Amino acid sequence: MVEAGRLKYHRHRNDRVTASFFRSHNSNDSVVTVDEIQNYYDCRYISTCEDSWRLFGFEIQFKEPNVIRLPFHLLNEQNILYEDHQLIENVIESAESKDNMFIGWMEVNNKFDAARRLTFAEMPSYFVWDKQGHIWKPRKQGHVIGRLIHIPQSHREEYYLHMLLNYQKGCQTFADIQSVDGVVHDTYKQACYAIGLLQDDKKFIDAINEASSWASPSYIRRFFAMLLMSNNIIRPDICFVTFIFSVVDLGFERFANEIMSTTLAKIEELLQLNGRTLKEFSDLPFPDLLDSVEPRDTVFLDELNFNKNDIDGESVIRIPDKLLLDIELPALHDLVLFVYPDVLLHISSVDYFKDRSILAPTLDVVMKVNNHVMSLLPGNEKVYLSSDTLLNEDGHLESELYTMSTESK
């Protein structure tokens, strides 16, 4: 009972309320310190429906059917639990004599024909795991669903083993899991590729080829490192060959081996900055020396080995004749005709205008060049406007149009 006070009640969710107690008045007119934290109560709220359900003793929650998590592991990498006081010899002996659920699945495939028609994930639906005997026994009643534990793609071989266990049936050894059409593959990844569970890397190869036509070698290296870190490349070795060819095409044909070593070293540096390494990708070679030198290209050597003492603040730059306008006093019209020769003959060609441009220092010059070029083209001029902000008020046309702000481009 609260005298001279009130109870303030707030309901938040179906099972939670917040209640706060405070005085409505103070008869002594004295200063009272209010402790808001002490007066705050986070209470459990039980509705009439839940109250009746609990009084009758009904089940509060249940799951049907039961779901069993199925752990698995690579060869000789199973987990072993033991107490601190146990001797290591006893731990090893106990681990060798007791099979886990994954090894037990391979063992039961030797005994029952019905088990050989099931994947590891399907085993709990037809067999029961005996925790005392550490064996699978045929199920007599009930229905249970098995689910393999989640493995992220960054775990590489465990991830591909996870994929195979949803497909392979009747396996009695680890080699059977890696076997496809009688061929035992070296890795689980290769087995997944042989079954058809993995797609090819054509889209990544096309992306590398496209980038090689305009990007610099450093950009392509960063791009390839990003593809490796995404864990989406199925055959990194094939993509790496395409990547190397794209670099060789840039003028380093004589030093392919040095390019290979240098490129691998630089990619390793990029991966290490993100906590990764080329050693995670068994298909790719690993550089011998991370501090390998640049390829011995003559252009690089000429630029790096110049005599700094000969520099006196002036230099001569040779500009090709095809870039020079051979007119004594050129005007804007001469410049436009030089950059856009026979413009009327190529007015419908998109590539003609894409391959040419005039670099202007200011916006005023840009307007002059655009106006002069437009004056040479036939037809009526059309002006297209864009807006940076939208005036959303009644009576304005802009509020009824679908527009795109130039700031989002």
Image (spheres, rainbow, N blue to C red):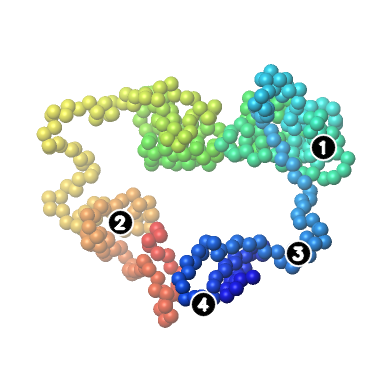
* Residue occupying image coordinates x 34% and y 24%: 293
Please state if 55 lies on the left or on the right of 9 as rendered.
right
Packing grade of label 1 (10 A; few <14, some 14-19, many >=20) is some
Q: Secondary structure at mark 4?
A: loop
Please state if 217 lies on the left or on the right of 123 as rendered.
left
Task: Name the image quarter holding the N terminus.
Answer: bottom right
**Residue mark closest to the camera, 1 vs 3:** 3
Q: Earlier in the sequence, mark 1 or mark 4?
A: 4
Q: Amino acid at mark 2?
A: Val
Q: How many angstroms separate mark 1 from mark 2 (CA)? A: 82 Å
On the image, which quarter does residue 42 sit in? bottom right
Q: Which mark is residue 27?
A: 4
**Residue mark closest to the camera, 1 vs 4:** 4
Q: Amino acid at mark 4?
A: Ser
Q: Earlier in the sequence, mark 4 or mark 3?
A: 4
Please state if 246 lies on the left or on the right of 62 as rendered.
left
Q: Nearer the viewer, residue 358 or 140?
A: 140
Task: Name the image quarter holding the C terminus.
Answer: bottom left
Residue to which mark 2 is pinned: 343
Q: Is residue 23 above or below residue 331?
A: below
Q: Amino acid at mark 1?
A: Val
Circles 1 and 3 in contact, beta carbons < 8 Å: no
Q: Secondary structure at mark 3?
A: helix
Could you tell me residue 202's position as x and y percent? 54, 39
Circles 1 and 2 in contact, beta carbons < 8 Å: no
